[in-house]
Image (cartoon, rainbow, N blue to C red):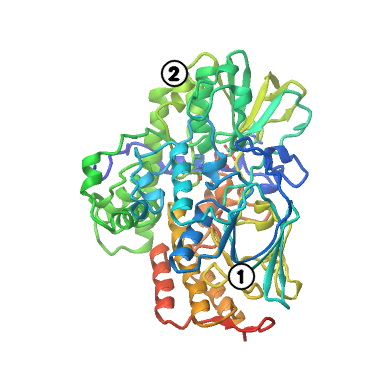
Amino acid sequence: MTTCGPSSPPRDFDLPALREKYAAERDRRLRSDGSAQYVHTGAGERSEFWEADPHSPPVQRDAIVSEVEVLVVGGGFAGLLAGAHLTKSGVTDVRIIDMAGDFGGVWYWNRYPGIQCDNEAYSYIPLLEELGYMPSKRFPDGAEIYEHCRNIGKHFGLYDGALFGTMIRAIRRDEPTGRWVVTTHHDDELRARYVVLATGPWSKPKLPGIPGLDEFTGHTFHSARWDYDYTGGSVSDTALDRLADKRVAVIGTGATAIQIVPHLGRHAERVYVFQRTPSAVDARRNPPTDPAWAASLEPGWQKRRQAAFHTFASEPFPTRSPSEDVACDFFTEVGRNVSARIAGRELPPDELAAIREQEDYAVMERVRRRVDDIVADPATAEALKPYYRYLCKRPCSSNEYLETFNRPNVTLVDVSGTRGVQRMTEHGLVAGGREYEVDCVIFASGFEISAQDQRLASGIDEIVGRDGLSLQDHWRDGFRTLHGMTSHGFPGMFFMGNTQGGGNASVTANYVQQGEHIAYIVAQAHARGATTVEPTRRAQDDWVALIRAVATPKTFLEQCTPGYYNNEGGGNGGIRPATGERYGRGFYEFDRILRDWRDTGELPGMALLGAPGDRPG
Ligand code: NDP
């Protein structure tokens, strides 16, 4: 496997002029409605874009009334890792519930043509060593990752008791019995001592807020519910033969569209890609896994690799030597080049920030020049260039995406100046005053972000804790948690994902961390004869205060072009990171806090409650 040093991006550019260009590009996309521009799906509204499952038949069954120790909401990586760690801690009465027909989360739902992991799988896919599995290539296909999810389920016995095809409607605390009562669209009544909310940050599709969305009479679907009946082909055979006489529009040019568009270009009669903001698309190095390298790995290799990946991909000023960057790709390039410049020196904050900015602009300039090298039409090439800082949006890689715009049947429709598509009509889409008639519109328009609103993102109407306190009200002015995982007033309820915890470049590492911690707490409660656990108000408030005291300033996000990373540039709810309120001193420092907390053996700030009705101090 490669190790690498700093790259050599271009240096002959005018940084102050580019800075102004970035600001102008952001400003012309800013809109006062921010994230409110989007159209929600589910719960009776456009439910076909969310609740309809193209991969499994609807589950028909009688309502279940049952009791379980731990009920996990969500069977994606987060829920699976909670289940895995609980099982390892000896807590085996675990029931995972998911609206999908199987485990897998995003890897169950997203089966669009071309789906692959887009950051390197040796770091991203969890439990590789534990399951004795090695990805077939650096960026494996979605089907392979989905299979790994299923294998986690089998390995830890999580299929026992799992309920698929089941949508949770409400989770309410029943204080007299000390249980959570979970109701579903099958009219189940499931009682649980503990509930783990592992609903995932990208599970609920959202639609673009285009006037006239319902007027279009052609076919539509969201990228996360790919309709192979309409397009032909399958996830394993991407020959989309039924599109040969179809005009297709794609709305969106994020990480998903980058993977889809080349397949549409190859198979559809005409493709219109409606682009509001271009992605930064680098080359994709995706070799098969070298068996000799795999055989040479020493135990503990995955955690070490993740640590290196996270250093260069997420730390603003990495101090490791660039030669330790084993991923060696676009995700880590800016970090690697910054670390080469710092070269282990102690530098003042201004100088560090200047280095970071210069390296960021240089790498983004390299990516822009790559567009000129590939795309033949100069106007199309210019429109495809990303003018914003690295990590304002998800970095992408593809050896086919930009190339697709050289095809005669593919047109890029730049809608940046009109704040998106102007409107939909009976026959198509209007942009720049012209109507584009199409047979099908594919929404690659992203997902509700759970860091902003758990109810919106999960579709669970009510999460109500002790004394009728709704989680939405409790978190109305921001998260209130201990370590991002528990909240006062919600005994025995745990949260996974982006709240007030650590953050890094692959979300699965967060889930491992959270799964371990939650399992430890539940196992300790059992061992000590407690019936549930709950953080004290004081411990929660102290954590919130610490999180805010060490928070990273929002300056970077404020400068970014709008997108889900910065709550669409503000407007509704102001600038907010999609990653929640991360612990600002880094993922590994947060990990140390959790370990130290566990090492005390006393669960400080966490009340172990005995009889139902007990309350923490
Ligand atoms: P995104 O939210 O990243 O992209 C949505 C796209 O829709 C943007 O290009 C947005 O434009 C565009 N859009 C929204 N409204 C309009 C409108 N009215 N008119 C025109 N365009 C519009 O969603 P994705 O599904 O692409 O990606 C979501 C996340 O999923 C990624 O960031 C990544 O984290 C993850 N992902 C992971 C993969 C993996 O392999 N691990 C693969 C694919 C996705 P604008 O930018 O202007 O807002």
Q: Position of residue 28 (x, y in %)?
A: 61, 39
x and y, in percent, of residue 323 in the image:
23, 50
| Label number found at residue 376 | 2
Residue 271 drawn above or below residue 191: above
Say which element carries label 1.
loop
Work out whether 19 lies above or below 308.
above
Q: Is residue 118 left or right of residue 64?
A: left
| Residue depicted at x 62% and y 38% | 56
Tell me what residue is drawn at x 67 percent, y 56 percent: 573
The CA span between labels 1 and 2 is 52 Å
Looking at marks 1 and 2 on the same chain, the residue that comes earlier in the sequence is marked by 2
Q: Nearer the viewer, residue 25 or 78?
A: 78
Q: Position of residue 128 (x, y in %)?
A: 36, 51
Q: Quadrant of ligand 1?
A: top right
- Which quadrant: the N terminus? top left
Mark sitting on residue 480: 1
Q: Nearer the viewer, residue 361 or 607?
A: 607
Is residue 418 shown left or right of residue 299? right
Split into 4 quadrants, where in the image is the C terminus? bottom right
